[in-house]
Amino acid sequence: MEGWDPNTKSTLTQIPLLTTKAGPRDGAAWTQRLKEEYRALIAYTQMNKSKDNDWFRISAANPEGTRWTGKCWYVHNLLKYEFDLQFDIPVTYPATAPELELPELDGKTQKMYRGGKICLTVHFKPLWAKNCPRFGIAHALCLGLAPWLAAEIPILVDSGMIKHKDDATSSNES
Amino acid sequence: MATVKKSFHNACKKGNEFRLGGAQELESTAVLQVFLDSEFRHKKPNFGSCGGGAERARMEVELKEMLDDLQSLRQSLSDPSLHASIDKLQSRVDHLTHLAKSVPVRRTKVKDMSAEVVDSNPYSRLMALQRMGIVENYERIREFSVAIVVCICLLLPIYLSKKAFASTLGIGGVGSVAAEMLTRCGIGRILLYDYDKVELANMNRLFFRPEQVGMTKTDAAVQTLSDINPDVVLESYTLNITTVQGFETFMSSLKNKTFCPSKEGSGVELVLSCVDNYEARMVVNQACNELNQTWMESEAQLSRLMPVCEIARLFILIQNLNVLGLKHFQSVSEDAVSGHIQLLIPGETACFACAPPLVVASGVDERTLKREGVCAASLPTTMGVVAGLLVQNTLKFLLKFGHVSPYLGYSSLKDYFPTMAMKPNPQCSNAACLERQKEYILAKPARDAAEKAKMEAEAAAVAADVPLHDDNEWNISVLDDSEMESTGATSSDALPDGLTRELPSADEFQKPPTSGATDNAIDDLEELRRQLEALNAD
C-alpha cells in the first residue's frame, strides 16, 4: 500500500472486510458473501456521505447479485461528470476481481479494455490478489475505480474527449 | 452462358451485315466488344458462387467455342484493318478463360481418409505419417473433438504511466491459427468460443481477412475453416465465459456428447486455451478442474515489464517485417518476444491456480523494468510459432506419438526452449483442483499395477535378449528418476533470482474474533438490499 494517499488508506481501514470465500456458483455460501458485500457497501456509502464525498450509486441488477449497475461521478473544475457504471461478478470470484465497466467511455481512452472495462491491472489487481477474499465490491470501487477516475477524467476533459452535459446540450440546468 | 453466346452471334451477324460499311463496321465491332464486356461483367460473380466443378467445365467449353467463333469471324472478314480489333477480342476471351480456371472451387466432403498418393487427396501427406510408422492410426483423428477458447478481448491498456502509448491488443492470433492447423489435419470437431468481432486492427494476425470486418470472430472462423476442410464439424459460441451465464453454456457445451456418444467423461478430448488474460485463464481452469478435463494453455506475448530499449528494438524489428504500423503496435509476455504452452491434467499436473504466473526479468535488473513508456506487443511470427507448438503437442497427445511436453517455453530473443513438469500444489486455492488431486492419489495403486503390467509385457518381449552385463563387480544399480525427484523436491516457496510472481499470493487469512458485535449485525439479505437502496435514493 505504499504510494497511496493517507486519505484513501484511512477510508479503506473503515470499510468492513469480508470473510466468506464464495463465488456466484456456491449456493448458500454466496448468499452469505452477498450479505457481507452489502454490509461493506452500506458502510462505505454512509462514510462517503458523512464526509461529503459521495461519488457513486450501485445496486444489484438481478436477484442473484451477479450483475451490478449504477452511476459514478467525478467533480473536475467544479463541474460534475457522471457515468454509467456496470459489472458482472466473474464465475471465479473472489479469486479474480470484478471488471468494472464504464461503457460511455469505451474507445475514448487507452487505459481501458474492450467494452469499457477500466484497466485495473497495475494499480489494483495485485492488491486484490493479496487480500483475497477479504476485499469485496466496496474495496474495488475505493481502490480500483476511484483512483482511475481521478487520474483519467481530468485528462479526458482537458483533451476534449468528454464534454460536460451542460456544454453538450446547452441546457440551462446547473 | 447461353445468352452470351446468342447475343454474340447476333452481334456477329450485325458485323457481317455491315461488312461493306467501313466506319460503321468498325463501330459495330466496338459495340460487340462493349457488349461482350458487359455480359461478362454481369456473369462474373456467378463464377464464384456456382462453385461446382461441372459448371466450371461448362463455362470453359463455352469460352472455347467463343474463341472458335471469333476465329471464323476473323477469316470471313475481308478487311485486314479489322483483324487487330478481333485479335484484341480474342486475347480478352483468352484472359477470361484463365480467370475461369482460377475461380476457387469448394471441395466436397471426403467420407474416408485415404492414404492413396494422388494430388486430389487432401489427406495423403497426413496419412503418410501412419505409413512411416510415426502414428499408429491417423484416421482416429476424426473421432476427436477439441474445444478452442479464443481471445476474450483485451484492447488498449497496459498503462504504467500517463504517457503510455499502448493500443490494440487482443489475441485471437494463436487460437484462430491453431484452429486452422487442426482443420487442415482433419480433426473431427472443433468448438470455438469468443465474444469479439473482427476489426481492421486484427489484420496483423494471421487468418482473418479484411472483408470479414464486422463479423463475429467465431462466425468468420467457421466461414474460413469450412471452406478449407468441409469434413470438420465446427461449432461456434459467441459468449463471454467469465460471466455466470456464459460459464454455464461453456460447461454444458463441453459436456455435450452427441458427436461421439461412446466417449467417457466429457464431450471433448482436449480444451485449448488461447486467451490473453488472467481472468479468462482462471475460468478455463475452473471449468476443466470441475469436469476433470485435460487442457492446454498457451501464451504468445511481449512483456508488460519490458524495458524501453527492448521496445525500441521491437519497433525496428516490426518495421523491418513491415507487418504492423506503429499506431497499431500490439499486445503483451514475459521477456519481450516469447510464449509458452502448458499441458494441464487435473490432479496430475499443476493447475493454473496452483502455480500463478511469474514475471521473468529477462536478465535485467528488475527495478529498471517498470518504467514510463512501456507497453505490450505481439508479433504474428511469435503467435505462429506458439500456435504451431500448441497444435503439435495436441496431435501428439491425441494420436499418442512422441513425447507430450508438460511445459514448453519459447524465448525468441535468445531462441531458448525450456521444458519442465510441474506437480500440483497441495495447498492450491482451487477446491476442484484439490479434489482431483485426492482422486489421483487414490488411483495410484491401479496406475502402478497398469505400469507394472506394461513393464512386464515389455520385459517379456525383450526376454530373449541377453542381459547387458553378466557380472556386476562394483554393485552398480540404477535408480528410478521419479523416486529421486520426489525425495529431492523441496517445498520451499522461494523463487530463483530474476523471478517474481505477477500477482502476490494472498496473505495468511486470520479468522476475525466471533464476538457479539457480528451477531448483532443484520443478517437478512432483503433488509440489507433495502438499506443500500435507501442510501442510493438520496
Image: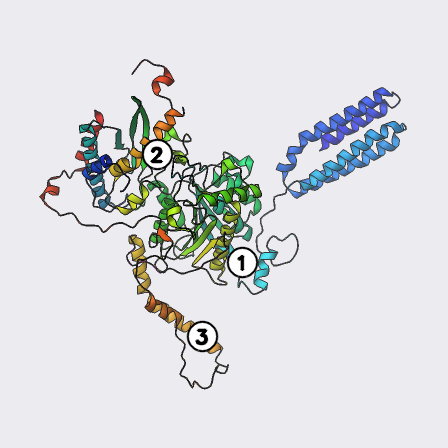
Where is mark 2, residue-wise? A101
- Chain that bears disc 1: B
Magenta span main SS: loop
Taking the image as shown, residue B115 lies to the left or right of residue B280, namely right
**Badge 1 amino acid:** Glu
Determine if residue A78 is in view: yes
The residue most toward the left is B516
Amino acid type assigned to the residue bearing label 2 in the image: Glu
Are the residues flagged by discs 1 and 3 from a single subunit?
yes
- Which residue corresponds to the image point at 47% horizontal and 86% vertical from the top-left? B470
Callout 3: helix, strand or loop? helix
Q: In the picture, which quadrant includes the N terminus of chain B?
A: top right
Which region shows up in magenta?
A: B413-429
Residue drawn at point x = 23 percent, y = 28 percent: A54
Q: Give the residue at mark 3.
A: B457
Could you tell me residue A24's position as x and y percent?
A: 28, 43
Disc 1 target residue: B139
Give percent across and percent down for residue B265.
Answer: 38, 56
